[in-house]
Amino acid sequence: MTQTSELREAALSVRGNAHAPYSGFKVGAAIRAASGRVYRGCNVENVAYPEGTCAEAGAIAAMVAEGETRLAEVYVVAGSPAPVPPCGGCRQKLAEFGAGDVAVTLATVDGAERATTIAALLPGAFDAGHMA
Ligand code: THU
């Protein structure tokens, strides 16, 4: 099993735990951190809609909670007809913890995949250097 297919399995399995009663749109994210460990997250919606959180945010929070801050690879899967693009906020969250060349795979449950990178998802990203 490749590292990417390991991430796919992790993202698919955590997607099953998504709490998405309002949108009906379940998303799973798996990230491999610099250590090699895999962290998972799913979207968690709320009856107060803006309080919902995305799958990517959950996976990043799980990574940081374990003391890791560097992303090596990202995989996101949803039950959409085409690979789902991360929202703007999640693009910024990914850029916080991953270099521009970090591989991001966007996928459907059916197996379609789109390969991209953090930099391609967020060109011209605001980063700490802009505050120097
Ligand atoms: N969602 C994610 O979790 N990640 C994405 O990349 C796109 C959207 C979630 C948020 C919300 O719970 C549902 O999908 C519909 O927007």
Image (tube, rainbow, N blue to C red):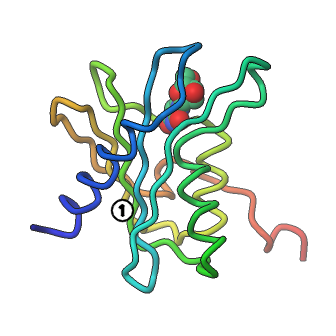
**Up-down: is 101 above or below 91?**
below
| Three-letter code for the amino acid on which mark 1 is drawn | Ala
Locate residue 95, reporting x and y percent. Answer: 61, 61
Screen quadrant of the N terminus: bottom left
Residue lying furthest bottom in this view?
Answer: 35
Taking depth in this image into account, of 4 and 25 the one nearest to the observer is 25
Residue 110 to residue 63: above or below: above
Asked if the beta carbon under badge 1 is closer than 8 A to the nearest atom of ligand 1, the reply is no
Left or right of 88 on screen, residue 121? left
Q: Is residue 115 above or below residue 80?
A: below
Question: Dividing the picture into quarters, in which one does residue 109 lie?
Answer: top left
Q: Residue at x 34, y 49 (%)?
A: 11
Q: Position of residue 86 (x, y in %)?
A: 51, 38
Label 1 crowd (10 A; few <14 / some 14-19 / many >=20): many
**What residue is rendered at 43% in x and 28% in y?**
26
Quadrant of res 10: bottom left
Counting from the top left corner in percent of width and height, residue 76 is at 38, 45
Along the line of sight, the residue nearer the viewer: 90 or 118: 90
Ligand 1 lies in quarter: top right
User: Which quadrant of the figure contains the C terminus?
Assistant: bottom right
Point 55% across, 77% down: residue: 70
Q: Secondary structure at mark 1?
A: strand
Q: Nearer the viewer, residue 120 or 109?
A: 109
Q: Position of residue 106 (x, y in %)?
A: 34, 42
Q: Taking 132 as reference, is 61 left or right?
A: left
Number of numbered discs: 1
Residue 111 is drawn in which quadrant? Answer: top left
Residue at 70% of width from left, 25% of height from top?
46
Residue to which mark 1 is pinned: 103
